[in-house]
Image (cartoon, rainbow, N blue to C red):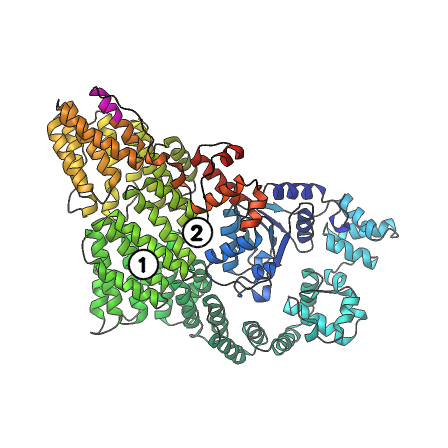
Amino acid sequence: MPDSPSLIGRDAELTALAAAIDADRATTVIGEAGIGKTALLRAAVAQSDRALREGGAFATLRETPYLALGRALGTSLAGDPASVAARVETLVGPDVLFIDDVQWADGQTLSVLELLVGRILVLTAIRSLDPGAEAAATRLAAAASTTHELAPLPGNAARSLVRARRPDLAEPVVDDIVRRAAGNPLLLEEMAERGEASPVLARVLTSRLEAMSPAARGVVELLAVADRPLPAGDLDPAAAEAVQAGIAVETDRGVELRHQLVAGAVRDGLDAGARRRVHGRLAELLGDGPEAARHLAAAGRASEARAAALRALAASSDTHERAALLVIAAESSGPGAGLERRLEAARALDEIADWAAVTLVLGSAALAGSASGQAAEDVAEAHALLAHAAFYLGDVESARRHVAAMDEVPISQTSAGAVRCSIEAATFLVNVDGSVAEALGRIDAAIAALPTGDPAIADLAVLKGSILMLATGAGDHGQIRAAADAAFDAGRYRTATDRARVVQYLLLMAVSGEAALEFLLDRQARYEAAGMQSMALDFLADSVVAAILAGRLSEAVTLADRLLESPAAPLARQRAEIQRARALVLLGRIDEGERALDSLRPAVSTDYFGQAETLHGLAEAAWYGGRPREALALADAALAVTAPLPGARVPLVLTQAWARLDLGLVQDATFSGPLSPSVEGARSEVAGLRALTERANGEAATAFDRAAEGWAGFNEPRVLLSRWAAGEARRRDGADGAAAAELQQVLDAAEAMGFEPIAARTRRSLRLLGVRVARRATGGGAHGPNLTARERELVALVERGLTNVEIARRLGLGRPTVARILTSAMTKLGVSSRAQLAAIAPEP
């Protein structure tokens, strides 16, 4: 039986939570106020050997970024969610992070919690039925936090709690208390303390106020409306009276009411005028800043609230804090000015790629804007920003709705809002619908509407040039790169990122995979140094693709593992995991790659980059694994997903064509229109496949030679596939000497690259020529280079005899993170126990 009376009747819940903590399973406890969520979580952690880092959110400070996390860790936090998540993980390590009242947490805190679930042990509590409760619970559940609904105490347990508090009460009184409290532990304790059941909740919780002095009651009202601790030195000395009466408590955080239900009951007892007066007193107590501005607004002093917010804005440099202040100013402004302030906040958040915050700041304002006298230009731009945010949050249909909504708003085509709408519409047309011509038409119309010399023409021209270059794979990427650098230096990180992506794709399409990889790793380092970790990890995810194309297969796995070691956004993790699995397949670890792709498939995004890329990876695995019929079905399914650009379909068509060859089917693959240099080799590869189907082996060999030349620099694995196909065609044509020489070169290159499926096919071709082949270790089997720096560090600590918990504490990592990194290292090194791992540990 728990020692605390408030935990009577909670044995089963306590056991379940203790098991979750032991298993490092993130858990969200949901229940009504007073039901015992906080006490239960604290008690469960107390039964473990782990320290508790606890912080709570406040209803009156929900705009303050990372407030609850900062309270839990005793430090201020700033930066994008990925950077903050990495910092929090370091500070918490193998211990427990508990965030209370998450329904009041700011959006940035929720984003950090989503990134940390599964990396450290995250416990959260949500007060049901409060605004924000359902949204917070949904986000945490989607991040894989287990939800536990805390039910009211059953009758026998409720009776035991009352008896533990007041054993002298008569049986009828106990019965009445149990009936009226409805299983709520706080109410049971309060009623037991009074010695009677009250039919009115407020009476139960605030009855002790009656005996207090007016000054003490004033302090209680102040604390109730503040809804957070206040320093004892800032309060009337009568605060001691409230503490003595048990209605308030004093902690190292200050003086606060003993429970939210008490605060709610006191607030409910204030009429509108009294509540406004208390808000005004709080504003005067707090002096200046965002919280004072919020209380001034609640006091009905709108002009003072707006002035306070703008004063604080002038002294603030943090984007999230500035956004919160702009929202306060917007809410204190008259009709027509509110959305303008919100837009200013959203533009800043957009530039640091905090899409969730953009949605929070603009959502309701944009949808209601047309009906509330807001400027049409502002309403249209708000929809454009929301479309951009929705797309990057993976909600393509919401993005489509916002694009349609912005186009329905009649605005001047020379306005700044119109330019942003044109940019967003064109980007959406390319990224989602693949409608390049329509996108270019939209940009041309926007440019034509602007007066000569308008600075917005430059942004539109850069976008047009980017789309043309992406569509054709040709053009001067130096201009776009310079524009990306200029935007980065100006702190326009999202704009810089959009332009850098164009450079990235142009390098992949027109220069080489090596050049793209070098550029991407440079961008990753730059953004990381600037504190833009979320964007840095996006570039790191894309570098995995570039490494595969450059033929650096083991490095592709290592780069993906580097990302997966960090708190990364879902789409970045998705890209890294899909491409890591593809690299594993090319390294000959086909079963491992297939398992990874199969596990990802149910949860990937519904767009091309999620569904089609996963299906294509599975199709490649099936084909290299000798299952052409399955490969063909998977390739067909992937081709049914709309591609953002025509060139994206080329690798899928080739996988489909190879499967058709193995099945003896007629080749029907064709490529009409121009192709970018990066995929021009596909024409010759298809010609070679068609010739093989027709048994024109000499012609096939020549076509595959051309294909290898076309793929050179752009797709090194495809170069080896084409060279093997050329050698195999010559073998079938009877040119044994030329075939053997070519195939031996292919084998050497494939083994050096670690491209085991092609190495295996090449060995078979050589054996059919009568050449004895000794299998050598491939590049993918050179274990040391496969380990990330973090994996090497952890393996070295295992070698020194440290446990997972000791490693976690030393390096500032969560236990699940340590386990995941060590599992990855053990898989790469081919060992199954810590003893084996320690025995072959490479130098750190």
The numbered dot on residue 498 is: 1
Q: Where in the figure is residue 208, as x and y percent of width and height?
A: 79, 66
Q: Quadrant of the N terminus?
A: top right
Residue 569, disc: 2
Q: For numbered disc 1, what is the local secondary structure?
A: helix
- 1 or 2: tag closer to the N-terminus: 1
Q: Secondary structure at mark 2?
A: loop
Start-end of magenta stretch: 763-770
Pinpoint residue 101: horizontal percent, then vertical percent. Answer: 61, 57
Question: Eyeballing the image, is 665 above or below 218?
Answer: above
Q: Main secondary structure of the magenta part?
A: helix
705 or 12: nearer the eye? 705
Q: Is residue 128 found inside the magenta-colored segment of the image?
A: no
Residue 736, image quadrant: top left
Crowding at label 1, few (<14), some or many (≥20) Cα neighbours within 10 Å? some
In the rendered view, tell whether residue 296 sits above or below residue 185: below
Q: Say which amino acid is labelled 1.
A: Asp
Q: Which residue appears at 24% of the width and 73% of the height?
A: 454
Quadrant containing the C terminus in the rendered view: top left
